[in-house]
Image (cartoon, rainbow, N blue to C red):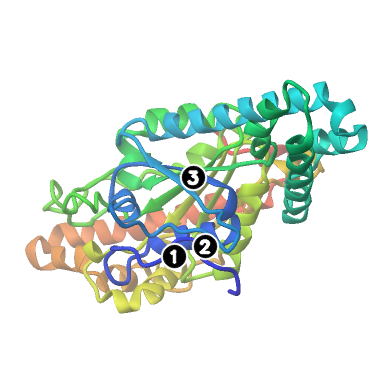
Amino acid sequence: MLLDPLFEFSGACAGCGETPYVRLATQLFGDRMLIANATGCSSIYGGNLPSTPYTVNGAGRGPAWSNSLFEDNAEFGLGMRLAADQLMGYAQQLVRELAGEIGGDLAAALVDAGQREEAGLVEQRGRVAVLLRKLAASRHPRAQELASVAEWLIRRSVWIIGGDGWAYDIGYGGLDHVLALPYDVNILVLDTEVYSNTGGQTSKATPLGAVAKFAAGGKATAKKDLARLASNYGHAYVATVAYGAKDVQTLRVFHEAESYPGPSLIVAYSPCIAHGYDMLYNQRQQDMAVKSGHWPLFRFDPRLEATGGNPFKLDSAAPTQPIKAFMESETRFAMLARSHPEAAQRFLEQAQQDAERRFKAYRELAQKPADQSKPET
């Protein structure tokens, strides 16, 4: 709450469910973030030049942001990770070569520094500052070369950000490819359950029975369970969040995902004006989505399995409200009862069954012994 956000004054819709997640990420990691932003709502309000909502802190550090194509954002972000790792490796090589010039203890500390926690990053920044002062006074022929890449000795936090249209549909092949690899990237999916930026077309994230463009009679198939699919790999950190329902769980997930030394995926429930209710009640709707079983919360952390624990943690309780209460509170579902009442009733019954079945499956995963907790493909 007391940390400076490095994302502010965006042009998003009032009450947008996406922007609080981006703001939180910049509060926690903004001074070292590299952001690959998929085309969509988040790229429009994130890069509406000549202004930009991204800013810097008092030390002049802030997120480095770029937008590529809709379909290749995951690969684009992976490229950022590979480039950052390559530059860090080159800087470490030069530090080893100049160890006699800069001091063996400093060189060893720069190369071996632990930078998974904030304290370690602060200490590394201090070492880099000392290094730069020594290099400025040095006459070594490669001193300036090391000075030009010294900042890359500080670990960068790479974030691949986009909406459900990118993650579930058009860019899913790339997203799946990046998740299948061992590289340290953080993927934030801002799930509005519809193609928000282009007028509200249905996507694979759109839930059963919701009315959207190209699904005027209600979507006839269930929502794709992206988080569970990703957890099947077993080596990726995966979590679902909804800050309006459990803000502490959301904060914990962001910390765990960023500290995980491999691919991490956060699927964030992001209410949208296309859902058809007053966005003043954004957080209430998130709470209803979780309590009705529409949006269960879980974390899958492979580090727990390495220590003999169950990597699957269910963070939401059994549904305490019928899914009917949630669906009838949003126009995207309620309007179907007027236009196609029989279909609406059928979808409602199926949605209730799906919510109960999904929670039961998640609960069974959370209760399994550690060696059996990996989801079945």
> To which residue does mark 2 refer?
24
Read off the residue under disc 3: 227
Q: Whole-percent x and y of residue 128?
A: 74, 43
Type of amino acid at the residue the image marks with label 1: Pro
CA gap between label 1 and label 2 equals 6 Å
Task: Identify the residue shown where x is 68% and y is 24%.
Answer: 90
Secondary structure, mark 3, is: helix
Q: Position of residue 39 (x, y in %)?
A: 30, 42
Q: Say whether residue 115 is left or right of residue 330.
A: right
Q: CA distance from mark 1 to mark 3?
A: 20 Å
Counting residues from the start of the chain, the first of labels 1 and 3 encountered is 1
Residue type at numbered disc 3:
Ala
Q: Position of residue 120 (x, y in %)?
A: 77, 50
Q: Is residue 170 visible?
A: yes
Q: Secondary structure at mark 2?
A: helix
Of residues 150 and 337, which is closer to you in this image? Answer: 150
Residue 370 percent across, percent down from the top left = 74, 43
Quadrant position of residue 339: bottom left
- Residue located beneath label 1 in the image: 20
Q: Are marks 1 and 2 in contact (CB under 8 Å)?
A: yes
Task: Give the answer, above or below, for where 96 lies relative to 214.
Answer: above
Dot 2 or dot 3: first in sequence order is: 2
Task: Say which residue appears at 55% left-offset and 32% top-offset.
Answer: 81
Q: CA distance from mark 2 to mark 3?
A: 20 Å
Q: Residue at left 91%, top 32%?
A: 104
